[in-house]
Image: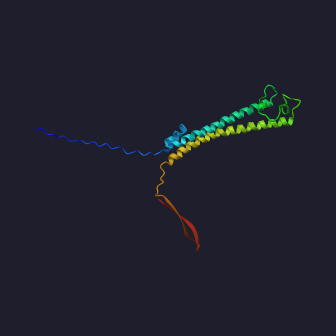
Amino acid sequence: MLQNNSAQDTISISRPSRHTFKAEPLRATMLAIALPGFGQIYNRKFWKVPFVYAGFGGVLYAIRFNSKEYNIFMKAYQDFTDNIAATNSYVNLITNIKPEAYDPVLHPKTYDPSTAAWIRDRMLRQVDYYKKYRDLSYIGIAAWYLYTILDANVDASLFNFDVSKDLGMKVEPVMMPLSGQAGVGLSLKLTF
């Protein structure tokens, strides 16, 4: 007689405990330096990525706009101050005054020297204005880049910050003796 003495082996499969994400500030910073927005993705703040690139887009637009206007007014200023009649790009920029009133090259007999000086000064002011804001836009792109890096670092540093209900603060009035007299003050009590 054969006996069936087989023991049944049981295999229990348990799911591994979920690894809780703990952001590392150094890694978030390095990723943000490598490519803007990666630090925010690493910190699982996906909603910040469009703002990162919108900021870069806005600053790049400002650089492009101010550079274009700077080049237009610089060319017009150079054309206005040279003595070549063929270079007159400034005529298209000045719309409310006729060239006969301010252009010493095209209209040497009818121009007014004070109007010509005023036009030259206005163009030079426009050149300086757009140069200033073009340069500030370049500084702005560097500042925005540093801001996104700092945001990724701070966000990773504060990722595991405890905001449980065990934290508390209570402000109460307190009587304090001051050189033989009673004084009133505030007491701050922190509970952890």
Q: Is residue 29 left or right of residue 110?
A: left
Between 30 and 59, the residue placed more toward the observer is: 59
Tell me residue 52's x, y (percent): 57, 40
Tell me the quadrant of the picture where the N terminus can be found: top left
**Residue in the image at 76% along x and 38% along y:** 125
Between 16 and 143, the residue placed more toward the observer is: 16
**Residue in the image at 71% along x and 37% along y:** 130
Q: Give the residue at the far bottom of this rendering.
A: 180
Q: Is residue 63 visible?
A: yes
**Residue in the image at 71% along x and 34% along y:** 69
Tell me residue 144's x, y (percent): 60, 41
Between 92 and 130, the residue placed more toward the observer is: 92
Tell me residue 151's x, y (percent): 55, 45
Q: Is residue 35 left or right of residue 16?
A: right
Q: Give the residue at the far front of this rendering.
A: 96
Q: Is residue 30 visible?
A: no
**Residue in the image at 56% along x and 66% along y:** 186
Dividing the picture into quadrants, the one containing residue 53 is: top right
